[in-house]
Image (spheres, grey):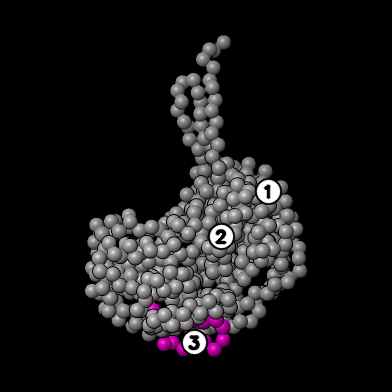
Amino acid sequence: MQSTWSHFIGGAYTGDTAALHEYDPRSAAVSFAIAAGDAATVDAAVAHAKQALAGWRTTKPLARGRVLVAVAAAIRANAARMSAIERAETGKPLPVSLAEVEVTAQYFEFYGGIAPLVHGESIPLGPDYHSYSIREPFGVVGIILPWNSPLTQAARGIAPALAAGNTVVAKPSEFTSVGLLALAAIAGEAGLPAGVLNVVTGTGEAVGAPLVAHPDVRKVAFTGSLRAGQAIGHIAADRVIPLTLELGGKSPNIVFADADLDKAAAGAMTGFTLNSGQICVAGSRLLVEASVHDALIEKLTARLGAVRFETGDGHGLGPIITRAQYDRVQSMLRAAAEQGACALTAPAPLPDAGWYVAPTILVDVTPSMAVAREEVFGPVMTVMRFDTEAQAIAMANDTNYGLVAGLWTASLDRAHRVAAQIEAGQVFVNEFPSGTVETSFGGFKQSGYGREKGIEALHHYTQSKTVIMRIAKDVP
């Protein structure tokens, strides 16, 4: 596997020599070396994207869609290679990395299929006028990505941006850049014109900030931490450009007494261990009706006993992806113990190397504890009791975040009633987590704004123009 990678600009690998190291979290050993870009690299990438814009935006939507569908097919044809890169960057077990490659292909396939649906409407103003709206691409779009799901997160933004007729300069996380660099070349081989998709690697300070500040970048999409999102928001506000921000969550997962407790336990377990808890939709706050609290904890404890870690055969739980995040998770667990939380921890022995954290369920948690309020981004779930439906809703909404929520109940009435009162962009009922490329995704409150996924994302990568034409009454 290639170990040294450069930027992908104007349809080719080019630019700086490798200066940054990525680490395989399964062993903490160096896996790849990538280029350290700067403002000059961003300038070059944006120039190529701007040059390619005229040809791409005027390509018929159906033809653009065909290219994206071809990219999807090429991703699937390279699934083994892409999965191997994903595993070396993130440590994800083989079934997970293969599934993420498949979802990456699905994004390009979905947006390729609906690219012709970007259209306006006729506006009736009476017989003296012909008025209509059209949706146009912004131009060059900057997309800044996180490290937890590098391929799917990239495709989630890039595919709709391209389908709408924009060109893209993407900045992946410096911890997980290689998958997107490989994808960009695969897309070019599948027919995506040179300059339409460019990838600049490096740190947020050296590459991300100049990308947002660049005068030729007309729209930015960012997924990552609240603090980084706030910094990007300040730059974008000064420039008065639109943003899509997805900034994480502290998602409630509510279990009512009438729920199927076996299914709820399975869903709760998946909700905080999927990707070792490193997902923004993690069900990290389990709210349980008091009368079934002990029964549910018993079922969850049994599931903790069945946990295993991935040890080379591709199955089991993977590691925390970065050393800094591993240290943060450990620090939050220590603080929770000092504040009186009781930890139920998976007994499986940890691998000898790498950044692994045992899945941990914290009971005796109070709503004021940091672990109940701050995003842990690791396999940690807090459990709190409630007595009434109104109390459950109040506890669920007692957070600065509002990305997703889950609820478990046999009552259809309660499901609709509670879902309507939860402050979150998505609410899952009797399943957690769920969602597909077709469903709109985004947050309330400090989880961000704008929407990714689904047909709605196309609207967030276009701007509306209205044409009003006066029609002459007299015909010569």
Residue found 61% across the figure and 69% down from its top: 176
User: Mark 1 falls on what kind of element?
Assistant: loop
Q: Is residue 334 left or right of residue 208?
A: left
- Marks 1/3 in contact by CB < 8 Å: the verdict is no
Q: Which residue is mark 1?
A: 216
Question: What is the three-letter code of the residue carrying label 1?
Answer: Asp
Element under disc 3:
loop
Task: Please give the label number shown on residue 372.
Answer: none
Q: Is residue 22 above or below residue 107?
A: below
Residue placed under numbered mark 2 in the picture: 229
Cα distance in 3D space between marks 2 and 1: 20 Å
Quadrant (top left, top right, bottom left, bottom right) of the N terminus: bottom right
> Would residue 440 be found to the left or right of residue 68 on screen?
left
Q: Position of residue 333 (x, y in %)?
A: 46, 80
Few, some or many residues within 10 Å of mark 1 (<14, 14–19, 20+): some
Pointer 2 local density, CA inside 10 Å: few below 14, some 14–19, many at least 20: many
Query: Are the two marked residues, 2 and 1, in contact with CB atoms closer than 8 angstroms?
Result: no
The residue tagged 3 is 350
Q: Is residue 124 above or below residue 70?
A: above
Is 437 colored magenta in this rendering? no
Mark toward the viewer: 1 or 3: 1
The span shown in magenta is 346-362
- Write down the quadrant of residue 144 in the picture: bottom right
Q: Earlier in the sequence, mark 2 or mark 1?
A: 1
